[in-house]
Image (cartoon, rainbow, N blue to C red):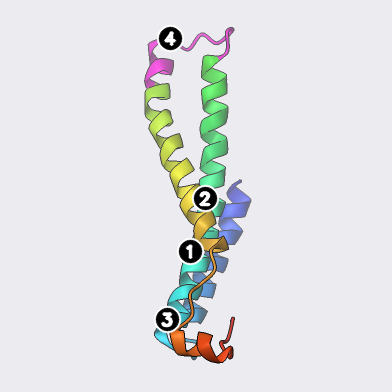
Amino acid sequence: MFAALAVGTPVCVWALRRIAHSPGDDQQRRDRAWAITGAWGLLVSSQVLLVVLMIFVALTEETACAGPLGAATIVVTCPLGLLSLFTFGWSLVTVVAPRAVDDEAADDGTYDDE
């Protein structure tokens, strides 16, 4: 998990920097930046969801002797899991959702999908 973050984060920063200095209008750069940010959000939120799920399963097993500290940990990690689930959904929609094109380009049928 750490290796994925250690590789993915600098790659996303590099891509955002490259997008910021690339030719094109502001809307194209904004759409590309949203897609990169969404991809990084998928990377991070999926890993946080896995960690929260592992903690929750470990603390709620029948044989677990978590006690009051385990109950406090569950109270803290459940909202984190919900936040990660929301972030995962937002990131997925951001990456998958088609981008709108301006009206005159749509009428001509000559829009650039890039």
The local secondary structure at tag 3 comes to helix
Query: Which of the two marks, 4 or 3, is nearer to us in this view?
Result: 3
Q: Do labels 2 and 4 touch, CB within 8 Å?
A: no
Depicted 38 relative to depicted 29: above or below: above
Q: Mark 1 points at which residue?
A: 37
Q: Tell me what residue is drawn at x 58 percent, y 48 percent.
A: 2
Of callouts 1 and 2, which one flags the residue occurring earlier in the amino acid sequence?
Answer: 1
**Residue 13 percent coordinates (x, y):** 49, 69
Q: Name the residue under label 2.
A: 44
Q: Tell me what residue is drawn at x 43 percent, y 76 percent.
A: 30
Q: Tell me what residue is drawn at x 45 percent, y 49 percent.
A: 87
First to last magenta residue range? 61-72
Depicted 69 relative to depicted 95: above or below: above
Would you call the spot at circle 3 few (<14 residues within 10 Å), some (14-19), or many (20 or more)? few
Q: Front-most of 96 and 81? A: 96
Q: Front-most of 111 and 61? A: 111
The Cα–Cα distance between marks 1 and 3, rounded to whole angstroms, is 15 Å
